Amino acid sequence: MNCCGLLTPEKEPVPLKSIEVELEVRDHVATVVSTLLYENKEDKPIEAVFVLPLPGDAAVCHFSAVIGQTQIVAEVKDKQQAREEYDDALSSGQQAFLLEESDQSPDIFSLSVGSLPPGESASIRLEYVTELAVQADDGLRFCLPAVLNPRYQPQGSEGPSVQVTSVPASLVPYSLSFSARVSSPHPISKVESSSSLDPLQYLNAEKTQATVRLAAGHKFDRDVELLIYYTDAHQPTAVVEAGQASAKPGTVMGDLMMMLSLYPEFPQSVMSSVASCGEFVFLMDRSGSMRCPTSSSKREETRISSARDTLLLLLKSLPMGCYFNIYSFGSSYEHMFPKSVEYSEKTMEEALKKVEEMTANLGETEILKPLEHIYSQPCIPNQPRQLFVFTDGEVGNTKEVINLVKKNSGSHRCFSFGIGEGASTALINDLAKEGGGHAQFISGGDRMQPKVMQSLRFALQPAVQDVSVTWDLPKGVSATVLSPPITALFQGQRSLVYAQVSGQSSEAAEGCVTVKYSLAGHLSQNQLRFTLKPAEDTGLTVHRLGARTLIRSLEMEEREHRGQQVGGVKEKVVELSVQSGVSSSFTAFIAVNKSDGKEIQGPLVRRNVPAPMILGACKRRRRQSKTISFTPLCGEILVGKKRGRMPGMMCASVVHSLPSYHLTPEAPRDALLQLVSLQKASGCWLLDAALAAALGKTSEEVEKPKPASVNQQVWATILALIWLHGFKTDAKEEWELLAMKAVSWIHAQNAPCVTECVEAGNEVLGCSVEKDSLGL
């Protein structure tokens, strides 16, 4: 073998030389174009196979290849037909290109470049569109998945496993360049990233257009995340897009397509009260990969230690009178209590002791069994079930898990958290989508706690019921909603609705959509008026997103009825996918180069392009550390009827072995969590040496100034509240709920001299916090 060019650790050449990504953001929709440059420096023709991550909600809408001066644009076809065409082309010595979605998870694709002759180059272009999620601080999040950790698939799961050729991020042998262009009707206030960026460049005086680039030397140790902030952007909007001129009227691509962004505003009378009931079930990933650092910039903080701190905050913030339980899972699962228990000082302390002992020692990531056990438990009357799932998302049987959540969606709300680089976007987003909850991702330098506490506030909001969407359109115009029915609404959070608009009307015609719902017994509604004039220069972005939404709904319906006598759903998906040019689990993009008619000579050699795996970041120096061995996911290349592919197999390959990992001792708990750990379930604090130490004082300094007529717990609780408001305002979202509980406890005591306590407490702690700001 001629070992020139880039090499894997096994000294095999890597034909992928570079990936160039261009992102265009328009308001809150992103179009992503990735160009992958391949070059064969060997003396034999090769087949290069690259298993790569994409956002789980992306609509892949273009795939093409350029060889020399020839461009070949791929077509969307039935997946089995596409595979057969690809195999036939390779068998007959033709160049062929195949892009297919995993059967198990919609955020993993296999890209096969077949019969690349010696000395030949190929440029592959892959395009997709996706919506940008709104974050807690009103930023819009775009994530370019770069890390693809091995996905664990349990024995007995449906379909073949997806096995990935992976190497530690530091050994990835190809480069990545990334640039973004952002435009919006609203001024762009800033763009942030977990990766190093060149300075933001504004393109006009209004600051409504800007460009930004990834700084040179990016390492594949993280996904590329952008947070885009507009000025006052998150308002209800309607975008209308003209249909494709060549498409037949009455079809998804031929009619107008509308994308509605709804931001419900709940009545203040309802929002001012926090629920004091509920069954809170926390499901914690304790697989081996949870030992990894939360990010490359916080190597002393592991995913499991951050999760433990988060559970502490959650347990302290729960309302008295609710019920809770904590499950943890890996290859097996455990639960703290046989069934959910009432929240009290005793049960909280018992749970906290077990949380402190939690380690990432349960093996692989098997989430299906604990979910089945949770759903098998009867719901508690008048205690709505709220499920919180924490995982780094290295799950292979994603669709099975999502099917289970959807099947039980009527009994609970599901809030999901993707921890660390490489978390499956399909798993995290769809858990929340099908469970009527909210999804969050914790990566880079993010703290887990504020995001989780925002979700707890959502969980404490009353569940919205009886949601209906009605349309008021001009005569002769009708709307067909392509999105699944809205089952969950949260204050200030966006809900997207796609609708196909049929019929004729003047461009000046207007319509109105009304969302009605019941919230804590109150009937409410929000309206959005819009014009039917199509927006300019949108391409077919909205149509493709609408088609993708309908495709995903039909795929879910097909899985629900699999094995039953319900025909035609798969055929509908294939027809819609081919018509719209958007990928699905039943179709694939296929291109065959028939231009020159030359047959490529010689045996074909397969080259698996490695994807970066963040587990390599777990490696540590040996001093003062303990050794932890990971067993890497391994597999053999399976040989099917043709070209190494078995029926239903997306890709199988060998995963490179990894060394043992060495973790440094974890950092001590910070001052905020130290204070929080001392709070009682009722909301109060005790006046003792531990509290004094957490406040940075001696016991005498905090005990002596106490007014004589005030009991010790009231005084201790006021001191804690002053410290939180005086020194931790930047982390208010983390402690706000437990502070509200503390204030309610003080009010219940009918304590005298509260004003005097606040004044004395300010003097003790060196603060100037007003009594009113404490809520007292």
Image (cartoon, grey):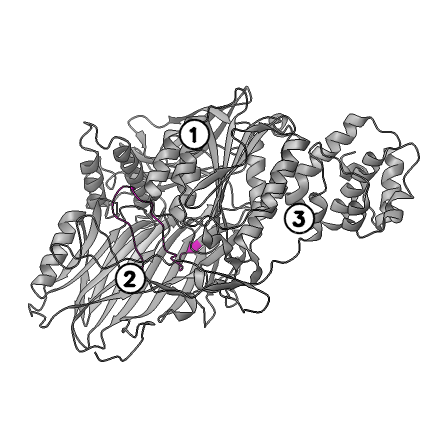
Label 2 sits on residue: 654
Question: Which residue is drawn at the image coordinates 72% and 34% (left, top)?
Answer: 683
Residue 378 % position (x, y):
46, 23
The answer, for residue 655, to whether it is visible in the render is yes
Mark 2 vs 1, N-terminal side = 1
- Element at label 1: helix
Quadrant (top left, top right, bottom left, bottom right) of the C terminus: top right
Question: Which residue is drawn at the image coordinates 51% and 55% (left, top)?
Answer: 291
Question: Which residue is drawn at the image coordinates 10% and 70% (left, top)?
Answer: 600
Q: Is residue 709 left or right of residue 675?
A: right
* Above or below, 72 relative to 129: below
Q: Residue 375 — which label?
A: 1
Mark 2 vs 3, N-terminal side = 2
What type is the residue that disc 1 sits on? Tyr
Residue 151 in the magenta stretch? The answer is yes
Quadrant (top left, top right, bottom left, bottom right) of the N terminus: bottom left
Estimate the spatial distance between the alpha carbons at disc 2 and disc 1, rounded to whole Å. 36 Å
Label 3 sits on residue: 731
> Which of the 4 image quadrants contains residue 265?
top right
* Above or below, 66 relative to 419: below
